[in-house]
Amino acid sequence: MDLRLSALNLAQYPPARLIALAQLQEACGYETFWYTDERFFREVYSGLTLAAVHTRNIKLGTMVTDPYTRHPALTAMAIATLDEVAAGRAVLGLGAGVAGFTAMQLVRRQPTQAMREAVTVVRQLLSGATVDVYGQVVTLAHGRLDFQPLRTHVPVYLASNGRLGLALAGEIAEGAVMQGAVAAPLVAWFLAQVQRGAQRVGRSVHEIDVVSRVNLCLDPDAHVAKDVMRPAIARSLITQYPHFRTFTTAGLEIPSQLQELIATVGYTHDPALLAPVAAQVPDAFVEAVTLAGTVEDVAVCVQRMVQQGIKHIMVYPQAPDGDVERVLTSFAHEVIPRVRASGEEAMPGTATPAAAGWEE
């Protein structure tokens, strides 16, 4: 079974632990060390450069940078520099962003168009062109890099939980990333949106690396693992207010009392602010958008996702005691072997639920 693994790392760790995490993920077989560009944590390219010089093979990617807090010309400059340092291991993860926008007084205008224009600018600059772009969101007048990038094409992964953003990924990107695509209806919907964009330009969906980005907690006590997940789900609900599309697509209904509480809280990583919302997050929400439970529980869930068509899982590890290293190691060495063994036992040529979902 060809199942690809990568890991997302919040830019919260001091240098020594960041280096150790990158080295651990490389040793465990994770394909990419993804690092957040999140306000106001440690700076993304500094962290990725540090990881690059202390590893040899693992890829290094932003997950995600955006076209609002960084002009795409600066992103082109930064990703080309990282690629040079990392000897061709850089990956550009781009999204519409959300963190810090209120504090920085930024307006998130036309997010899908902004991502399209950003990718255009980055790719043209990396190719060595002098770029003039006067887009609906991005403007660049006679821009050009003053050095020759190691590679003229760095892989681009677009991350979105929206229909238009995922279709754009299917149209123009090497990879499409959706957060929380765990429940069967979410996986089917995710694949359908990417395929829709791919078909628009005559691409096959199989040309695109379709990545489910999921929060992960492994614990012998499944209840403990689920409790760890609730604050992140609370933040996701707050971000998606008032439509909650990920959760409604999964077939869930947000209780009115929970909606009223969410309306009073802005985007935050502050545990104290998230706690009241987290306390009201039902188990069904945890199960729909995360991997949380025992090794056996999570292996069964991943196997079902793979049968639907997910071939790349990006995990964001969490742990009740903060020992994310244990979670990463256990996922790679205990969960994935179970999934692969189960996949090898499956009958070849069997139709999967994902096939029907793609034909929407």
Image: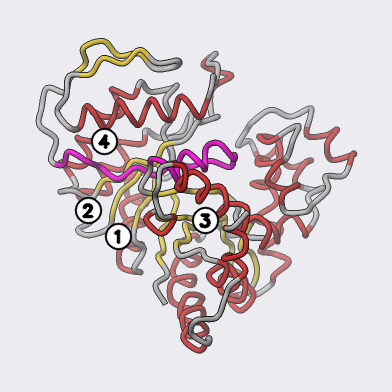
**Badge number at residue 79:** 4
Residue 264: percent from left, percent from top: 79, 27
- State the residue position of label 2: 54
Q: For the magenta stretch, what is the residue range?
A: 151-172
Three-letter code, disc 4: Ile
Tell me the element at label 4.
Answer: helix
Confirm or deny contact between disc 2 and disc 1 (CB under 8 A): yes
Q: Which image quadrant is residue 71 in?
A: top left
Q: Which of the two residues, 337 or 358, is positioned nearer the viewer here?
A: 358
Q: Is residue 11 in view? A: no
Up-down relation of residue 222 to residue 170 (above or below): below
Three-letter code, disc 2: His
Q: Which of the two residues, 326 or 147, is positioned nearer the viewer here?
A: 147
- State the residue position of label 3: 212
Q: Badge 2: few (under 14), some or many (20 or more) residues near its Cα, within 10 Å?
A: few
Mark 4 or mark 1: which comes first in sequence?
Answer: 1
Q: CA distance from mark 2 to mark 3?
A: 27 Å
**Badge number at residue 282:** none
Mark 3 or mark 4: which comes first in sequence?
Answer: 4
Q: CA distance from mark 1 to mark 3?
A: 23 Å
